[in-house]
Amino acid sequence: MAQAQRHHQLIHEARRSVSRLRVNLPARIILLDRTIPCVLENVSQLGARLMVEKPPKLGEFGIMQCEMLDCYFDIVWQSGRRIGVAFDQPIEQSVLIALREFNDTFSERQRNEIKALARSWVTGELD
């Protein structure tokens, strides 16, 4: 427990020194007893802010998955439907850059996939 508190303190101290990448991507958190869909709102090398329908409790831990991210985390704060998670290991800068590129084209790719699906449905090519 003391280690988790120290980790939270380090995250809090680094809050202003580590830049955050603003995104809006579907993600999920996997806890011991359930999996929760969520939206990744921002991410840094040390942690992330997530929007969830039913927030887990402060202190719970698990795995956050979003596209190329697969990170162990501890929940370090909760406010309404938003939670803050601290990663066990820092994320490499190159992964954050790739995530930014993915985020920048996500809406367009999603829209194109929906159009293709609708086109296949209309033409009867949908399996």
Image (tube, rainbow, N blue to C red):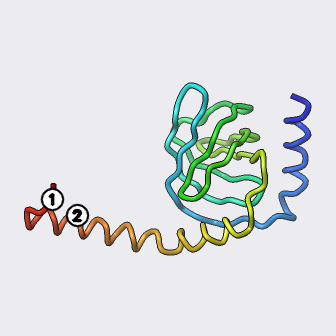
Residue 5: image location, x then y, percent: 88, 36
**Total label count?**
2
Label 2 Cα crowd, 10 Å radius (few <14 / some 14-19 / many 20+): few
Which quadrant, please, contains the C terminus? bottom left
**Residue 120, placed above or below residue 14:** below
Q: Are marks 2 and 1 in contact (CB under 8 Å)?
A: yes
Q: Secondary structure at mark 2?
A: helix
* Residue type for callout 1: Leu
Q: Secondary structure at mark 1?
A: loop
* Residue lying at 71% horizontally and 45% vertically, measured from the top left: 85
Q: Which residue is mark 2?
A: 117
Q: Which residue is mark 1?
A: 126
Res 57 → quadrant:
top right
Q: Which mark is residue 35?
A: none
Residue 61: image location, x then y, percent: 69, 34
**Residue 46, placed above or below residue 93:** above
**Residue 88, placed above or below residue 119:** above
Which quadrant, please, contains the N terminus? top right
* Residue type for callout 2: Leu
Lower position in the chain sequence, tag 2 or tag 1:
2
Residue 9: image location, x then y, percent: 90, 45
3D distance between C-alphas at marks 2 and 1: 8 Å
Residue 88: image location, x then y, percent: 77, 45
